[in-house]
Image (cartoon, rainbow, N blue to C red):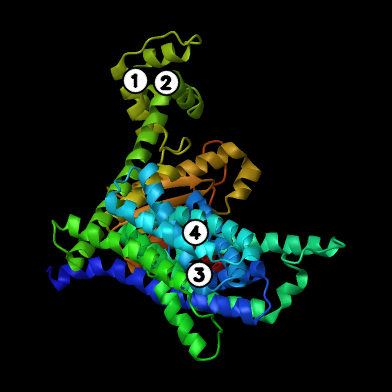
Amino acid sequence: MPSLKNFQPGLLGWFQAFLQIFFFLGLGYIAQRLVAVRWEVDPMVWGCSAFMGAALVLLIVGQKGQVAGDVLRRPHTWVFGIFLITIAIINTFLFQQITSTEVTLLHRINLLLGFLIGWFFLNRKQGWDRALSALMIMLGVLLILTNIATEQKAFVYTSIAIISLIGAIRIFVAEFHPENNAHIGFHSRCCMAGIVTAVTSIFLTVVAVLIAYLQTLSDAPIAFLPELSDFTHRGTVYGGFVLGVLFVAPIRYLEFSSIRLIKSENYFAVAALTPIAVIFWESAFAGLGLLEIRQLSKIDLLAGVLITGGALLTVYIRIKREMGGHFDLYEYMNKVADEAKDTQRVRALSEETKRRRYEDILEDSMDCHDIVEETMETFQRYVPKVADLLGVPQEVITAIDSDATGELTVKPEVMRTLQRNYRQNVANTDALTGLRNRRYLKGKIRRTIGERKIFSLLFVDLDKFKPINDTYGHDAGDRVLQTVGNRLEEYIDKGDIVTRIGGDEFVLMIYGIDKSTAEETAAEIRELVAKPMELEGIKEPLEVTASIGIATYPEDGKAVDELLRGADERMYEDKSGDGR
């Protein structure tokens, strides 16, 4: 048996899956049925309230997370969330027709569908044990379906088919969600789960309100659709919100986390215990007189044995086979966790490789003419400057620039030289001042954070600059910016960076200084910028001053945009504090 030190990481994913399935999901089903049976609720409005409550808790806990933008841009987020809401709404209707145990047993169809999806679409090897498990589950589901009352069959059959299919797909979407596979902490994972829940619940609420409004315009409202009065029904709103906070929020977090650690197939196997959990909690609540349940029939019991037994049989045979013929649950748990971590690392590398390949394709797609033309336009068609920046003779620049037909053949080594120097000297350079630009700065910050080096950003914004442009013209303004840029570049030490990120804004990136040292540096820069400037053609000296905001890594942030935003905000505080 592996040591406790090595065992703990492997246990975590399995523990989270069991906790989610047996406690939160089992109790959540019972609570959902209590609401559906004892209170007159509208399922769509109840779903809106429940998921908004869950999203609120997850976003409050995950407010320090830094994945919000990425999560919102992923199609995985929207697909997962829409499927999640759909399942919750249909479940609420089902609980009004059949028992919680029957609902959860029928949900196990997603084990069969998960088997088929993994086999046909993901090319995952499925042994005879999975086939036997699928057959047992299918027989169990068929037994329950044949025992459904005739008047309920059409609705139950259709509902179960829909939620089982999208439920199986949803689990794989969670497994392959890029942010879920990233090495992010607890707060970021809560943030991710909260956004997934929030964006879809907001969408659902808008749809529900629209439907309810259209209902008011109809002479014959449809009974099972929401009405405006449902949004003020206390049982629906309060009950849904409380259940969302207590059950939906932890279920969403644990689901994402456990799937990441043990993969979809093993999560499906643990999910086979859901009927057992529901029977346990349903019996407990019935014993307290809070819920009436009918006695389980022999068919229900047989179906439960087939469905649960089929899934557990798969687990047993798989563990025995992968452990070399012996059954060692602890060792298997750690093996699965290690494989999941390796898969995450491979996926992270794959994403990085794809990104780099994409950048390479963009670079290669720029032919010689594109590179030369853009550089010529940037530097006012001054050939000596362009040739110097691109690292080729002036004759080459002139020949490429005058080639209107595109028939000029350039040697591969010349192409590589143009591409390399364009990236280094043009794409990352501010044309007016010759300083590095915003693109270069953000890349440098990102790399430095990866190296965990301490640095400070000094965000410099010029005051009294606009009157110079208005009074003396933009040419004078450009010369002021060039003068300030030269002063700042001469001030910094070798290795530090001065960038112009736009307009009259400069950012200095200085390594190895803390907040107090950065403040002393800012005071010196204010004095340096404020020195009068003698410009040719202008009689009186021109003066500008500077407002400066400081952000230090890692004290003020651990991400590029967070640090730049913090320095920008403090610059405005400095500007308003001085009354500028």
Looking at the image, do the residues carrying marks 2 and 1 touch, with CB atoms under 8 Å apart? yes
Looking at the picture, which amino acid does disc 2 mark? Asp
Q: Label 2 to label 1, Cα distance in Å?
A: 8 Å
Q: Which residue is mark 3?
A: 102
Q: Label 3 to label 4, Cα distance in Å?
A: 58 Å
Q: Label 4 to label 1, Cα distance in Å?
A: 39 Å
Looking at the picture, which amino acid does disc 3 mark? Glu
Circle 1 packing at 10 Å, graded few (<14), some (14-19), many (20+), is some
Q: Position of residue 108 (x, y in %)?
A: 44, 62
**Which is more N-terminal, label 2 or label 3?**
3
Q: Is residue 316 above or below residue 78?
A: below
Q: Nearer the viewer, residue 361 or 264?
A: 264
Q: Label 3 to label 2, Cα distance in Å?
A: 65 Å
Q: Quadrant of the N terminus?
A: bottom left
**Which is more N-terminal, label 1 or label 4?**
1
Q: Which residue is mark 2?
A: 367
Q: Is residue 51 above or below residue 394?
A: below
Q: Which residue is mark 4?
A: 568
In what element is the residue under mark 2? loop
Circle 4 packing at 10 Å, graded few (<14), some (14-19), many (20+), is many
Q: Which residue is mark 1?
A: 415
**Which is more N-terminal, label 1 or label 3?**
3
